[in-house]
Image (tube, helix red, strand yellow):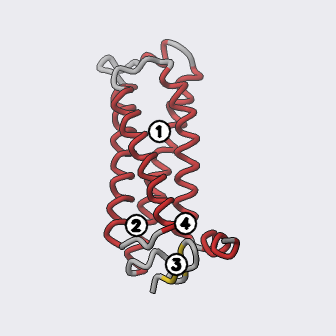
Amino acid sequence: MGRSCRELWKDYHFVLKIVTFIILLVIHFFLSDVYAACYQFYVFAIGYFYTAFINMIILLYAYVWFTNTFIWECCMIIATALMLLISAFVLMYDYYEEDGVSELDRRTRSEAKSFAICVGLTILAIVILIIDVILLIIKGGKGGRGATRGRGETTE
């Protein structure tokens, strides 16, 4: 297993997925601060966010232990990116209400900073996932690896 771990960390697709997963963990902590602002649409945003988070866990598990097909991996990455995009738009829509002044500005700056960091990191995660899909398409669906996955089985 040690050799497989080294090979996984050399694969840029795996590293991009891990970086996205870590970003989603950080976003989760900032979302809890935003929750204190009592967003009207927070339930929708957090629902899409948790679904994207679970998609990333499934992607990482499947990437390590199974041989993924090109179509499945691209569809999961695109679905995760779309869910993150929807959660960012819902948060932004709720942040900028009809009167142009948000509830966060009326309460604390800490919540406003958490909101900005949350949306910024969500956009960064979306960009990383798009880069991963583009690299998958360029590589022809080999997942960037072409060597081994999981317990040493070859994918070619």
**Does 14 sit above or below residue 113?**
below
Residue 83 position within the rendered picture, expressed as x and y whole percent measured from the top left: 35, 46
Q: Nearer the viewer, residue 82 or 101?
A: 82
| Amino acid type at image mark 4 | Phe
Tell me where residue 97 appears, x and y as whole percent. Answer: 33, 21
Q: Which residue is mark 2?
A: 133
At a point 51% along the width and 83% down the height, the residue shown is 154
Say which residue appears at 46% left-offset and 74% top-offset: 143
Residue receiving disc 4: 14
SS for tag 3? Answer: loop
In the figure, is residue 50 to the left or right of 113?
left
Residue located beneath label 1 in the image: 119
Rendering coords of residue 58 (x, y %): 44, 55
Q: Secondary structure at mark 1?
A: helix
Q: CA distance from mark 3 to mark 2?
A: 14 Å
Q: CA distance from mark 3 to mark 4?
A: 9 Å
Asked if disc 3 and disc 4 are in contact, CB closer than 8 Å, the reply is yes
Query: Crowdedness of circle 1 by 10 Å Cα count: few (<14), some, many (20+)?
Result: many
Choose mark 4 or mark 2, whichever is in front: 4
Residue 145 is tagged as 3
Q: Residue furthest right?
A: 2
Q: Earlier in the sequence, mark 4 or mark 1?
A: 4
The three-letter code of the residue at mark 1 reads Val
Location of residue 59 by image quarter: bottom left
Report crowding for label 3: few under 14, some 14 to 19, many 20 or more residues within 10 A (C-alpha): some
Earlier sequence position, callout 3 versus callout 4? 4
User: In terms of sequence position, does the residue under pointer 3 or pointer 1 come before the other?
Assistant: 1
Q: Nearer the viewer, mark 3 or mark 2?
A: 3
Residue drawn at 63 percent across, 69 percent down? 9
